[in-house]
Amino acid sequence: MIISEDILTTNSPNNLEFLSQVAEEVTPEEYGELHKLETTMLHMMEQEGGVGLAAPQVGLSKRVFIMQPTNGFTLFMANPVITKSSVMRMKFKEGCLSIPNKQVTTNRSRQVTIDYIDSFGKEQTIRLGGRDAIVAQHEIDHLDGILMTKYKR
C-alpha cells in the first residue's frame, strides 16, 4: 500500500475531491500489509501532533485509521463498523490534520462499539467512550468521505 509523504489538506481542490470519496474495504489479501501501514501512519500522526489519522488523509483510499486513545496505547482499525452507539450525545470541539487551523464543535455519540480488523488481520471488537469515541467517529467519517466541516453550524 503506497501512501503520500504528506497529509492531504483541503487547501487543494484535488485533495478535497479525494477526501470526499468513500474509501474502499481492505481485502484479506491486503492484511499482510497492515502492520507496515500502521507503523507509517503512526509516525505521520505523531509527527503532526494528531490523535487520529485516516488512510484517505495520506492518499490511500482504504478503510483504515489509527488513533491514540487516552490510555496511551495505539489503536489501529481496518474496515471499522460502528455496531452500537449511545443515544447520549457529547459536544466536542474537533480539529483535523486535513483542515489546518480550524475547529468545529460537533455533537456525537458519547459511546460507540466498533467491530474491526487489527494490524495482524484479526477480528476485534472495542467499546470506546468520551474523547476516544469522538476521535473514532471523526476518523470513520473520513472513511465515508465526510469532513468535520459538515457539522459546522
Image (tube, grey):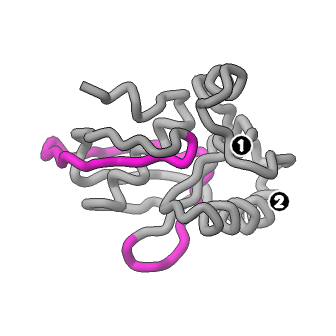
What number of labels is visible?
2
Give left or right: position of 66 versus 39: left
61 or 97: nearer the eye?
Answer: 97
- Callout 2 amino acid: Gly
* Residue located farthest toward the front when viewing the structure as drawn: 101
Residue 29 in view in this figure:
no
Q: Which residue reaches farthest left?
A: 88
Horizontal relation, residue 105 to residue 25: left or right: left
Which circle's residue, 2 or 1, is located before the other in the chain? 1
The residue positioned 30% from the left and 28% from the top of the image is 152
Asked if residue 71 can be seen in this view, the reply is: yes
Q: Position of residue 153 (x, y in %)?
A: 24, 25
Q: Which mark is residue 32?
A: 2
Q: Is residue 82 above or below residue 121?
A: above
**Which residue in the structure is indicated by mark 1?**
26
Residue bounds of the magenta highlight:
70-98
Q: Is residue 23 magenta?
A: no
Say few, some or many: other residues with alpha carbon within 10 Å of mark 2 (under 14 / 14 to 19 / 20 or more). few
Return the residue nearer the eye: 142 or 97.
Answer: 97
Q: Amino acid at mark 1?
A: Val
